[in-house]
């Protein structure tokens, strides 16, 4: 049933993403755009990827078969903005001892408060997606680059955790603008993440999963009565069985790719109704 | 030169020997302090931790010393609440060991956080849903209790005791000790448990995640139980080690046997529960997440099935049985072996619950991540050991830690005069 405009305006938002893996070429534009947009620090030597901060990271996965049956797929992984089994019970939010990471009931976005984080890294231990990064060093920008940093995103200091925010500062700007223009709702086009806009293949679609007029809703067809599980047979979420209830959906026409999204026992098939963990 | 400070009726080594010992251990301490300063000044890039290993050697050390320091709260509970009066002969040492373990844990935590100056945020911006918040509150409170339990011992120093105020304070604190022991046991139940909860609540980490009773995962209860079981074993082992180093019998056998027996039964019941928990996790919890238990012990260079055998059988069932049966319990070699195996077992348990949890890949296209600590991490982990040795050396020399020492080691008056 189609929702009305008024209903959409007053319902809490649930920002999320649909990433079409059949379209992703693994070019890395999303990663670069994310770096530039969010003042993500980098070092001269980034060879050790376990020390690299990549809010958006593109994984290369294969079907494990030998040539000529080898198939490759690139999988961009931002923070999954988990909602957990009851809204807000994300793996990381529930464990942070200083409430330095928060779940917004208005947007569904998991935030990180850098000035409150004291660097215990419990959230990193809790996140199965490795979407959280610790600042092992103070950020050092190449000479002159400070002038090109985004003024809308605070750089992070040594000793705190950071992660993808779905470009929340863009939402804030769009929301302020909409408010000043007669308290209207933020439109779909007004709030888009940097990675979404940078993807040359148009593989990333971003919007409100609670708004039937948004493209992401129409693609994902989330089932609000079943922890927003997608009704699209080609869509899946990473590690859905753990009960993380993420807001990033992946699409693929290839079964092995969909299967790579979760762990299955030898006798199990993806797509069957595996009940997620009931925890918390 | 310092004979006026040494308790009456006991013999101590020459001052130069004592100072030489302090100096040597002090060198190790200084090495640790240097590494600690490096971590504070230059940051955690001095470690080999990374974004896969956010929790590593230090968190293991924290969990391990707190488990081993569990002898303090459990012995206190047994003596002051359950009336096991024989334990009065070892309780001082249990408290001292507990004090060292807990102060070490707090020190390591202060090094481990990325922004140590913001550590108070854990109290100010407390998230009541976080197990770490519970740890912070209970740990701090219990450390205060341990300090209160240790103070009367300091006040019993020969010279301090001469001051009437301190003498009376010490006496009155002793009278109120049952209240502190009970408070300590209560707090310990929660912080030991919440340390278990730290890994048990991680529903994104199938290796450590466990089902719950109310809000507490099974690991909550297992950690408390194991600390109460293995903590006394650690107290016994350190007592034995102290006896070997001082070449004196310091605690009578009946007390040792009693604590060993209690530790044995506690380990036996714990390891039964731990075995049941492991089996439930292997055949119910992990498969529900799409994972076969063997997955957690394969395709990597370190974490194999040997861990399960070592932790549960070799360092669990074996020491339990050795301590439960009288003939083996009263055999000095087997008893000490059992306590040592127990210490290894509980330390290994803490290791896997922290480091193996971090190492296991969860995403299907991820890989095992192994980790080797940097020298700074090793030095700062050894630092509390050196600090503990120094505190034991000073306490043993100047405080009446062992009430039975005088009786068990009568000083030959002639020899004393000759020495003088």
Image: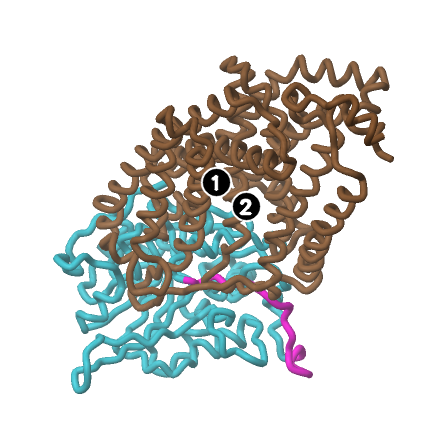
Chain colours: A cyan, B brown
Q: Please tell me which of labels 2 and 1 falls first in the chain.
A: 2
Residue A253 lies left or right of residue A189; in this view the side is left
| Horizontal and vertical percent position of residue A218 | 26, 64
Of residue B420 and residue A74, the one placed in the foreground of this image is: B420
- Badge 1 crowding class, 10 Å Cα cut-off, few under 14, some 14 to 19, many 20 or more, is many
Residue in the picture at 68% in, 30% down:
B147
- The lab-note entry on whether marks 2 and 1 share a chain reads yes
In magenta segment, residue B201 = no
| Horizontal and vertical percent position of residue B277 | 30, 38
SS of the residue at dot 1? Answer: helix
Q: Which residue is mark 2?
A: B62
In magenta segment, residue A146 = yes
Look at the picture and state if B334 lies above or below B87. Answer: below
Residue B34 lies left or right of residue B44; in this view the side is right
Mark 2 falls within which chain? B
Look at the picture and state if B250 lies above or below B195. Answer: above
SS of the residue at dot 2? Answer: helix
Q: Quadrant of the C terminus of chain A?
A: top left
| Horizontal and vertical percent position of residue A272 | 15, 55
Which label sits on residue B378?
A: none
Q: Which residue is mark 1?
A: B195
Of residue A56 and residue B232, the one placed in the foreground of this image is: B232
| Horizontal and vertical percent position of residue A201 | 33, 82
């Amino acid at each position: 049933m189609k929702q009305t405009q008024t209903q959409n305006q007053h319902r809490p938002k649930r920002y999320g993403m649909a990433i079409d893996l059949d379209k992703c070429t693994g070019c890395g534009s999303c990663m670069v755009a994310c770096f530039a947009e969010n003042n993500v620090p980098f070092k001269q030597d980034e060879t050790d990827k376990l020390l690299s901060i990549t809010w958006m990271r593109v994984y290369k996965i294969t079907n494990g078969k030998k040539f000529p049956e080898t198939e490759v797929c690139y999988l961009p992984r931002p923070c999954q903005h988990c909602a957990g089994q009851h809204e807000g019970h994300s793996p990381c939010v529930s464990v942070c001892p200083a409430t330095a990471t928060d779940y917004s009931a208005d947007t569904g976005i998991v935030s990180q408060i850098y000035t409150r984080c004291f660097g215990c890294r419990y959230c990193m231990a809790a996140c199965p997606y490795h979407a959280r990064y610790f600042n092992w060093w103070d950020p050092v920008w190449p000479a002159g680059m400070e002038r090109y940093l985004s003024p809308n995103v605070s750089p992070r200091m040594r000793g705190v955790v950071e992660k993808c925010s779905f470009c929340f500062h863009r939402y804030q700007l769009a929301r302020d603008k909409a408010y000043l223009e007669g308290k209207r709702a933020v439109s779909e086009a007004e709030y888009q993440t940097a990675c979404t806009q940078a993807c040359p293949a148009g593989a990333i679609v971003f919007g409100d999963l609670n708004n039937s007029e948004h493209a992401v809703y129409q693609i994902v067809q989330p089932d609000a009565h079943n922890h927003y599980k997608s009704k699209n047979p080609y869509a899946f979420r990473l590690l859905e069985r753990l009960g993380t209830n993420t807001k990033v959906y992946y699409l693929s026409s290839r079964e092995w790719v969909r299967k790579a999204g979760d762990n299955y026992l030898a006798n199990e098939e993806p797509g069957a109704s595996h009940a997620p963990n009931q925890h918390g | 030169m310092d004979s006026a400070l040494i308790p009456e009726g006991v013999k101590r080594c020459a001052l130069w020997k004592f100072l030489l010992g302090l100096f040597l251990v002090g060198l190790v301490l200084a090495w640790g302090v240097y590494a600690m300063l490096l971590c504070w000044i230059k940051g955690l890039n001095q470690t080999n931790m990374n974004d896969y290993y956010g929790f590593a050697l230090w968190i293991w050390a924290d969990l391990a010393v707190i488990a081993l320091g569990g002898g303090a709260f459990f012995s206190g509970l047994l003596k002051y609440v359950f009336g096991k009066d024989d334990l009065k002969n070892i309780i001082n040492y249990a408290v001292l060991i507990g004090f060292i373990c807990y102060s070490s844990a707090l020190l390591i935590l202060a090094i481990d956080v990325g922004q140590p100056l913001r550590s108070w945020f854990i109290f100010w911006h407390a998230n009541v849903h976080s197990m770490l918040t519970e740890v912070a509150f209970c740990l701090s409170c219990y450390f205060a209790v341990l300090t209160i339990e240790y103070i009367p011992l300091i006040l019993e120093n020969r010279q301090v005791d001469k001051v009437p105020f301190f003498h009376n304070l010490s006496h009155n604190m002793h009278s109120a000790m049952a209240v502190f022991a009970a408070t300590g046991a209560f707090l310990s139940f929660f912080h030991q448990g919440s340390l278990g909860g730290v890994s048990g609540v991680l529903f994104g980490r199938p290796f450590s995640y466990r089902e719950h009773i109310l809000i507490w995962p099974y690991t909550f209860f297992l950690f408390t139980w194991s600390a109460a079981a293995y903590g006394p074993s650690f107290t016994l082992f350190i007592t034995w080690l102290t006896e070997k180093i001082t070449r004196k019998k310091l605690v009578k056998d009946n007390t040792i046997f009693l604590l060993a027996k209690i530790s044995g039964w506690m380990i036996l019941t714990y390891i039964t529960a731990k075995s049941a928990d492991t089996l439930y996790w292997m055949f119910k919890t992990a498969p529900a997440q799409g994972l076969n238990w063997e997955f957690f012990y394969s395709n990597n260079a370190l974490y194999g099935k040997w861990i399960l055998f070592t932790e549960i059988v070799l360092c669990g069932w074996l020491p339990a049985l050795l301590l439960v049966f009288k003939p083996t319990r009263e055999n000095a070699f087997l008893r000490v072996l059992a306590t040592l195996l127990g210490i290894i077992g509980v330390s290994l348990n803490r290791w896997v619950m922290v480091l193996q949890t971090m190492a296991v890949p969860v995403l299907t296209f991820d890989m095992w991540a192994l980790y080797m600590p940097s020298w700074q991490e090793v030095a700062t982990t050894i630092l509390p050991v050196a600090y503990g040795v120094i505190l034991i050396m000073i306490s043993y020399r100047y405080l009446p830690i062992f009430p039975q020492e005088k009786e068990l080691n009568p000083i030959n008056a002639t020899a004393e005069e000759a020495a003088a």
